[in-house]
Amino acid sequence: MKIENEDALDDLIICHQCHTLHEEVPIQDGSKALCRECGTVLYRYDSKLIDHGLALSLTALIFFALANLFPIVKIELLGHEQFITIPKTFMTLFEQGFYIVGLLCAFLIFLFPLMVFTLYTAVFLLLKLRRGRQLTKELLVLLSYALKWNMSDIFLISILVALVKLIGYAQIDMGVAFWALLVYVAIDIYLTKQIHLSEIWMLRKRIYEEQER
Ligand SMILES: [Zn+2]
């Protein structure tokens, strides 16, 4: 089915809990709209969300850079020392001829996480500057696709599992990048769970509507 006027759908909102359809009404800054049927929070309006989100996504990018530049762990086995870094994990796969796995790994633990937080930073920055009406729309759509493929949290868990298995066989020292990755994943989970994309979408609509007046 082809929707004639997609903008008309922007004014409707569905409750995630009971699936009641509501018409979106403007609310005051700092308040939230609740579902009439079940009381679930439908949306919030908080103009501070932009500064908050921008600060978080910039911090995440810094920690992501640290996580990639320094070794995650140092493994010492029979007097032989080895440093493991994020780029090294997929580069080793390439060197050993596992091109498809290496490529997949490079996308899931490096390119998508980098893309997600670069997109977050760009969107929040544009919203703060109140510019790029069309661009923010496209970036948010791209972000919704990229978010599904960011697997840093799964990578962190797999490192922990691998390290637990190595305990007793080798001496393991956590590197700077391990703690940086931990902070990065914490921000990642907080940002994606706390600030829903639909909230940024609404904030965007509101900002550009205010601008038109
Ligand atoms: Zn409801």
Image: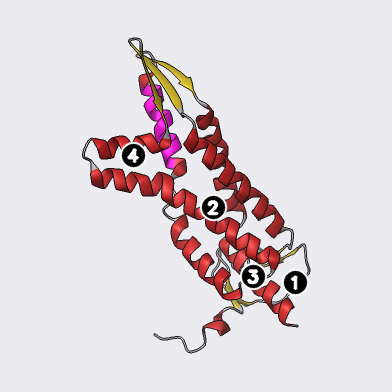
* CA–CA distance in space, label 1 to label 2: 29 Å
Amino acid at pointer 1: Ile
The furthest residue to the left: 97
Q: Amino acid at mark 4?
A: Phe
Can residue 6 be seen by looking at this rendering? Answer: yes
Residue 44 seen: no
At 50% across and 25% down in the image, what residue appears?
175
Task: Kindly indicate the quadrant of the structure image that contains residue 134.
Answer: bottom right
Amino acid type at mark 2: Phe
**Which residue is denoted by mark 3 in the rendering?**
204
Mark 3 or mark 2: whose residue is earlier in sequence = 2
**Pointer 1: what residue?**
27
Q: Which residue is mark 4?
A: 90
Q: What stretch of residues is rendered in magenta?
A: 154-165
**Any magenta on residue 155?**
yes
Q: Nearer the viewer, residue 81 or 191?
A: 81
Q: Secondary structure at mark 1?
A: loop
SS at circle 3 = helix
Secondary structure beneath dot 4 equals helix
* Residue, disc 2: 117
Closer mark to the observer between disc 1 and disc 4: 4
Question: Does the magenta run of residues contain 58?
Answer: no
Q: Is label 1 within 8 A of ligand 1 (CB to nearest ligand atom)?
A: no
* Predominant secondary structure, magenta span: helix
**Left or right: where does residue 136 sit relative to residue 92?**
right
